[in-house]
Amino acid sequence: MAVKPEPASALFAGPFALATLSAPAGPRFPALVTPDGRALDLRAAFDDERLTVLGLLERWETALPRLRTLAAASGGARTPLADLRVHAPVEPRQVFQSGANYRQHVIDLHVAHRAPGDERPEAERRAEAAEIMDRRAAEDLPYVFIGLPSAITGPYDDVVLPPEAGKPDWELELAVVIGRPAYRVSVADAPAHIAGYTIANDLTDRATVFRRDMPQIGTDWLRSKNLPGFTPLGPWIVPAASIGDPDDLRVTLKLNGETMQDESTKDMIFKVARMVSYASQSARLLPGDLVLTGSPAGNGMHWGRLLRDGDVMEGSVTGLGAQRTRCVAEPAA
């Protein structure tokens, strides 16, 4: 069962955002959403019945000025969001995910996983970890891997927990939305290829991260991260110009009303532009693609409390609105 969006007063930063919506029993359509909680069907505005948000991103340089004009105008038939269903804002062709990108999170992991025989005080081991993180930011590379678009679901849709997901966990993240093709772009040039930002909850089944049959091959992201619906996305794509500094946004996740994650993107080891630039060195980033930037401390493994049937996750990022998803256990076959 989908959950209605948050009140209009808390929608997003800036004069407008993009969304994919549908009326009851109607087809999905791209929409311009304004802070007063109303939506304009962009198929009519662009005179294209087959238009999608991905199609807008593919022509972002020419579409953006038109969207600004539409947002400022008073004309056009606009529908209250309360009468519409909100879907994931875009169907990307590629999803680039990131791990171990929040300094405090990785330091906590380093301290928690004490090597056998290491009896040093926690303060000393924490200082060592902090030095490693600073050196990593200066000298090393981001850790990026590939996700599947089929794992994406809407920001208010139920998240189905299948029986084979033994330890499902939350990971709220800032997601970058690409607006111009990017291949081997520099860090300085990377922001020019970003259309905007949205929210992703990059769920992980901790029970299947590592292969028990072949531990030497390391992580198994296919099984642990790409189950259907394991990436709630949205609700909106907020244009980059409306977000002052993506490296200074608050990422907050609440589980059943209790705050579990609450950190600024300032704590990221590799900042947004560097993440985009790095991914573009190996792959050609396409309009609509997502670059997930990692999740801060406070996931379920940290708290010793993983997701279960009936849990409600509420995730927000400064200026990007909020998503709310309920966990529903899939009956065993």
Image: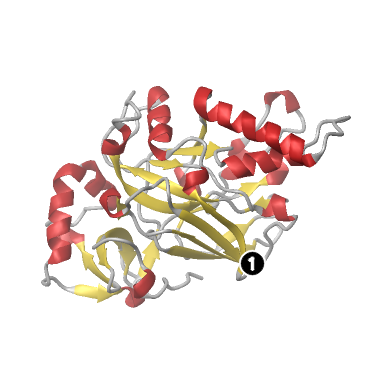
Say if 3 sits above or below 207 in the image: below
Pick the residue in front: 283 or 254: 254
Residue 128 percent location from the top left of the image: 69, 31
For the question of whether residue 28 can be seen, the reply is yes
Residue 220 percent location from the top left of the image: 64, 34
For the question of whether residue 141 can be seen, the reply is no
Q: Which residue does the image show at 56% across and 27% down from the upper left?
A: 136
Q: How is the image coloured?
A: secondary structure
Where's the C terminus, which quadrant?
Answer: bottom right
Q: How many marks?
A: 1
Residue type highlighted by circle 1: Asp
286 to the left or right of 42: right
User: Is disc 1 placed on a helix, strand or loop?
Assistant: loop
Residue matched to label 1: 311
> Dot 1, how many residues are within 10 Å of its Cα: few (below 14), some (14-19), or many (20+)?
some
Say if 68 sits above or below 121 in the image: below
Q: Which residue does the image show at 32% across and 73% down from the upper left?
A: 81
Residue 116 percent location from the top left of the image: 86, 30
Residue 332 percent location from the top left of the image: 71, 58
51 to the left or right of 313: left
172 to the left or right of 154: right
Pick the residue in front: 228 or 139: 139
Pick the residue in front: 95 or 292: 292
Q: Which image quarter: residue 12?
A: bottom left
Say if 2 sits above or below 222 in the image: below
Q: Which residue does the image show at 58% across and 44% down from the upper left?
A: 225
